[in-house]
Image (cartoon, rainbow, N blue to C red):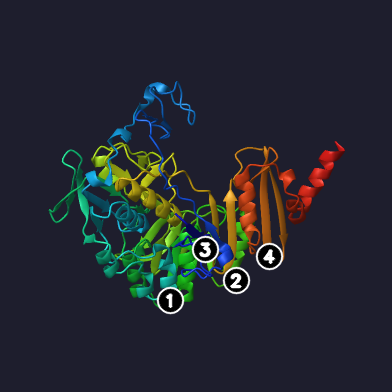
Amino acid sequence: MKTWQCEVCGYIHSGAEPPLSCPICGAGQDCFTALEISMAAAGPVATDAWHCPVCSYLHRAPEPPSNCPVCSATGSLFTPFHCGAASVASSDDIQRIVILGGGIAGLTAAAEARRQAPHTSITLVSREQSLPYYRLNLTRFLAGDISESELQIESGQWFEEHAIQYVHAEATALDREQKQVRLRDGRLLDYDRLVLTNGAHPFIPPFPGATRDGVTVLRTLEDARAILQRLRPGMQLVCIGGGLLGLETAGALARQGATVTVVEGFASLLPRQLPPRAGSLLRQRLEAQGMTVFCGETVKELVGDESVQGVLLESGRLLPADLVVVAAGVRPNSYLARQAGLTVHRGIVVDDRLISSDPSILAAGDVAEHRGMLYGIWPAGYAQGAVAGCNAGGGTALFGALAASTRIKVLDVDLFSCGQIHPEDASTTVYESEHDGVYRAIYCCDGQLTGAVLYGDTAGAGRLKEIVESGRQISEFPELAELFPRLAASREERKKV
């Protein structure tokens, strides 16, 4: 499958070549990289596997290991993990496929299942009332850059042409013995293969006052509509969370005339993607645009009567607020899977074919935990949806892993982060350079480039990503010394020794 990923926003493009520009964020062709999805026949898969209940490592062998190679848990804790390779059926034996979740993972799974099984009944169930849309574009919708109609991925006509039944409903229970999905309105959907792509939900920390009117999140189109209905020029907005979603939301609403304050519990912004110095530069950029930013501050209470009126910090500072947007991360929607007795750790545990502990049920996207990893990003949802849809339709495909790299644009600032940028010990050396608002950093361990960060100018991001993923010695890449003089000096010192 020839697909291309926009490294700025995560949009996926199918075709022989990447587009000239991203239709979602406008990034140029140079920001697209090939997204490798293994859809070829994978051959027989071992039927015996063992699941570590501590870290979710999967051990493929007739017997469990003496100790888990990931977390060192004793082998006696391992439980059988039945991925059911022997029960893999051809598309002719699969008459009914049900997919729960209308996000990118569910939509892609439905499209791939239809390609794999042209005559199988496919039903896609979504609790949202709208057709599938680009969730990653909700902040641009908030900012007024695009209309609501531009959010839509596929039209109703597309579902008709592909003979995919799209159902607006909420699933409330799974009956694995009868192979049925129960909907809230009482309907029962029979399945031969079930694909769980029911995503994740925003996490709201248990602040006192978190249920007051005017406290909201941004996850769905309905959330975005509700925020826009409340929005008034000059209103006081507090955004709790200085991660990517929090900053994009803050920037969007500031452009709509709101007075914006950002509160981040860590010492700097984008703590997962940026080192402290780059986070500090980003903070200065936000403040230059009129926003107020507090880092290293935690929320004590959301104060007010029926409606929120302010955010009280643990430091004692009270921030006035007409609206509070909480962007504190998400949690997988694993309730149905847990109730049905599937193996669930943080998410639904799946193997490389994205099959759960029940051979008739697969999972993909934000709800799926693969090799201990919850991706929570658009490209992973697309790739996993394609693999799960193929396998649900009787094909055989594998999902390996995606490189941990991020190329984003926040408030018109280009950022790139790749690999391990938070060293676990002193064996990692950091080389930094900063000039005219452009910051660069590389992380080196045992002679290899293990991580890289670019702020303000992402030229060379693709090359840095290749070097990080190659695992080769830094000495093989002389161009790095041109960007980081201290790296060159270090090499000279080693030569003298």
Q: Disc 4 designates what residue? A: 437
Q: What element carries label 2?
A: helix
Looking at the picture, how far across and down is residue 441, in whole percent? 67, 53
**Does the CB distance between marks 4 and 2 fall below 8 Å?**
no
In the rendered view, would you say 201 is above or below 369?
below
Q: Is residue 205 at least partly visible in the picture?
A: no
**Does the CB distance between marks 3 and 4 fall below 8 Å?**
no
Residue drawn at point x = 31 percent, y = 44 percent: 362
Q: Which one is earlier in the sequence, the residue at label 3 or at label 2? A: 3
User: What residue type is disc 2 on?
Assistant: Ala
- In the drawing, what numbered circle is on residue 288? 2
Q: Disc 1 designates what residue? A: 144
In the rendered view, would you say 158 is above or below 86?
below
Q: Quadrant of the N terminus?
A: bottom left
Looking at the picture, how far across and down is residue 463, in whole percent? 64, 54
Structural distance between the alpha carbons of marks 2 and 1: 22 Å
In the rendered view, would you say 141 is above or below 395?
below
**Does the CB distance between marks 1 and 4 fall below 8 Å?**
no
Q: Which one is earlier in the sequence, the residue at label 3 or at label 4? A: 3
Structural distance between the alpha carbons of marks 1 and 4: 28 Å
Q: Disc 3 designates what residue? A: 17
Task: Tell me if 59 is positioned left or right of 222 in this view.
Answer: right
Q: What element carries label 4?
A: loop
Structural distance between the alpha carbons of marks 3 and 4: 34 Å
Residue 284, picture quadrant: bottom right
Crowding around mark 3 (Cα neighbors within 10 Å: few <14, some 14 to 19, many 20+) is few
- In the drawing, what numbered circle is on residue 120? none
Crowding around mark 1 (Cα neighbors within 10 Å: few <14, some 14 to 19, many 20+) is some
Residue drawn at point x = 53 percent, y = 48 percent: 403
Eye-nearest disc, 2 or 1: 1
User: What residue type is disc 4 on?
Assistant: Gly
Q: Which one is earlier in the sequence, the residue at label 2 or at label 1? A: 1
